[in-house]
Amino acid sequence: MSITPESAKALLSAEDYGARIRGINELRELPAIEAFELVQLVLQDGNERVRYAAISLLATVGQVDLVKSLELLRVGLQDSEMDVKAAAADSIAGLKLREAYDDLRDLYQETTDWIIRFSIVAALGELGEPRGFEILEHAIQTKDALLVPAAIGAMGELGDPRAIKFLLPYVSDEDWQIRHRVLQSLLHFDTPETKAAIQTLAQDSESHISEQAQQALG
């Protein structure tokens, strides 16, 4: 049975929340302009899993109308469920809605929920908003086991040279996953300091780190 706007809409209107989620999945097979209109039917759904799926879909179909998407995702950031707020942050980054940076900053500052903070930090590199460095600077200094790796990665994506002094201490971190993440971030910079750090990582005990660093050095 082929997927049509009518078949998807019927599922989105079903009493069973599982059917509504299937309806959201069907929207992925429709033209974005039709999916964008239909997904708005369930953005305020009574089930948080449905809202989460709908907000997440906006990361792709929201390109149809970025102004409307910004409005919808700002509402999502105020949702009662933490997962939905986190999904809204992800979608804002995916659509590169830099106008929502202040909303993300305010939410980061007012919440203590790790899911939301992690999502915001991880999203800032993709968002590409220079002001995001202030959040990343805070996150990397928290020493939080989840926030630090996310901040390291986002600092590289953002490319602000102020990040270098925060990244260098992690070159010798005991966790190889952190060292690998640092290497990937350092590759976004071209300074004597970062080249020296990459040379250090070229001697790393983990072969995949050392090999990638050596390849980067040419």
Image (cartoon, rainbow, N blue to C red):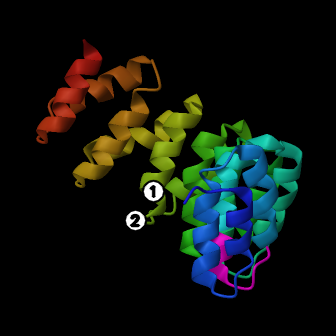
Secondary structure under the numbered disc 2 in the rendered image: loop
In this rendering, would 68 be left or right of 171?
right
Quadrant assignment for the N terminus: bottom right
Residue found at x 29% / y 20%: 216
Count of labels shown? 2
Q: Do the residues labelled 1 and 2 touch (CB within 8 Å)?
A: yes
Question: Quadrant location of residue 80?
Answer: bottom right
Res. 74 image quadrant = bottom right
Instruction: Verify whether residue 51 appears in magenta.
Output: yes
Q: Name the residue under label 2.
A: 145
Q: Which amino acid does label 2 sit on?
A: Ala
Q: Residue 148 carries which label?
A: 1
Residue lying furthest top: 218
**Residue at point 28%, 51% (across, down):** 177
Residue 184 coordinates in the image, percent (x, y)? 37, 35
- Span colored in magenta: 44-52
* 122 or 22, nearer to the observer: 22
x, y percent for residue 124 = 62, 47
Q: Is residue 201 above or below residue 61?
A: above
- Residue 66 in the figure: left or right of residue 2: right
Residue 212 vs 152, above or below: the answer is above
Residue 162 is drawn in which quadrant? top right
Q: What element carries label 1?
A: helix
From the image, which quarter does the C terminus lie in?
top left
Asked whether residue 45 is drawn in magenta, I would say yes
Instruction: Pinpoint residue 194: horizontal percent, then vertical percent.
Output: 39, 25
Instruction: Name the residue: 67% across, 73% down.
Output: 11
Mark 1 to mark 2: distance in Å? 6 Å
Residue 138 can be seen, yes or no: no
